[in-house]
Amino acid sequence: MLKAAILSISLLTIMASAAISPALGIIAAAFPHADAMLIRLIVTLPSMTIIPASLMSARLTRVMKKRTILFIGLVLYMAGGVGGGLVSSMDLILVMRGILGIGVGLLMPVSTALVSDFFKGDEAAKMTGWVTASNNLGGIIAVILSGWLASFCWRYSFFVYFLALVAAVFVVFFLPEPERQALRQKTDDKLPPVTYLAAGAAFAMMTVFYVLPTNIALFIKESGLGNAKTAGLALALVTGFAFVSGSLFSKTQGHLRHLMATVQMSLMAAGFFLLSGNPSLPLVFLAVSLIGASFGNLYPMILLLVVHGVPRAQNTKAMAVVSIFLFSGQFFSPLFFGALEHLAPNPGIPVIFVTAAGLSGGAALLFLVKAFRDTRSAVAGDRPQHP
């Protein structure tokens, strides 16, 4: 039940802002004078308030119990999430999305640090994979419910954030407070370089991956391939395949070893390439499945760098740094790809997808070169720094 309690919080975090994605087309219709970038901000704005809240979360662990921080985060999460459906202007919707982000920012560093608080070694690696799987299981539930609720009224789609009540029950009854003796070491010590390696990787991965939740609903609508329910199903496939790959992460890493990152980035590149060619609906579903499977393995790879490379006393602080860069990537994604789209001769969402495919493919080639060098070093008896 301890594992269930930790995973119940993980249900709410990574895909929290994307949960509303299937309803973007209907929200855009409800606010016809709102710019497309403003509509996309409904998904990405929480990322910016997550950043200061994540820093605050790491500092609060010095003076408050982690359970208390989690409760505060859950209250803000539900208030901001559900509140988006109770207001009547775009400005107020964005304010509520900001409150949602504060809740996520308080929850995420603490929830991910709980893995190293309670688990070690192989058990920590397995639990890290399950955290990612849980992130995406929450996404599956949220996007399906959101798309279905949006078919009745765009306001109802925000009610998916009542899922926070489930996590609150598990935290109350099954999550003990971690022992504080692990925090005797000064948390103000300089973080190891691996923290910033993980943070940079999180930023780059999320910048490319978030092309999907910020564009897929609009793409499906513009292409005449379906409605909010269709978009919800597509996003459910993303999170569904991420759930499966995350739950199998430990085994997959054991088989692929040095080629793990290369294979995952290749899957992401293939998915975005399929989307860029005006595909049929079955090909859209195949493409988003490939991207989801890739994400489900890339994210725990990043978390493990922190779990294994950062002292336990600094773990919450390190996870806060990674969270900041992760959600900065979410916010930066539509700005970066939107700017590139306008520079293209024929602007449109397919241009965004083909750019994401090119960046993913380039990263796959770089990882392949690194895997080749690491393999040669291993044969020569040298241990790679980051297998």
Image: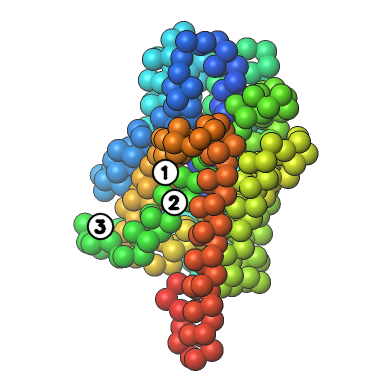
Asked whether the residues under the numbered discs 3 and 1 touch, taking CB atoms below 8 Å apart as contact, a structural biologist would say: no
Q: Is residue 23 left or right of residue 195?
A: right
Instruction: State whether residue 246 appears in this view.
Output: no
* Residue assigned mark 2: 204
Q: Position of residue 99 (x, y in %)?
A: 38, 26
Residue named by callout 3: 187
Q: CA distance from mark 2 to mark 1?
A: 7 Å
Amino acid type of the residue that numbered disc 1 sits on in the rendered structure: Gly
Q: Nearer the viewer, residue 344 or 202?
A: 344
**Residue for point 54% across, 65% down:** 365
Look at the picture and state if 386 lies above or below 235: below
Residue at (68%, 45%) from the top-left corner? 274
Is 234 rendered above or below residue 156? Answer: below
Residue type at mark 3?
Thr
Work out whether mark 2 precedes mark 3 in sequence or the reverse, and give the earlier one: 3
Cα separation between marks 2 and 3: 27 Å
Q: Amino acid at mark 2?
A: Ala
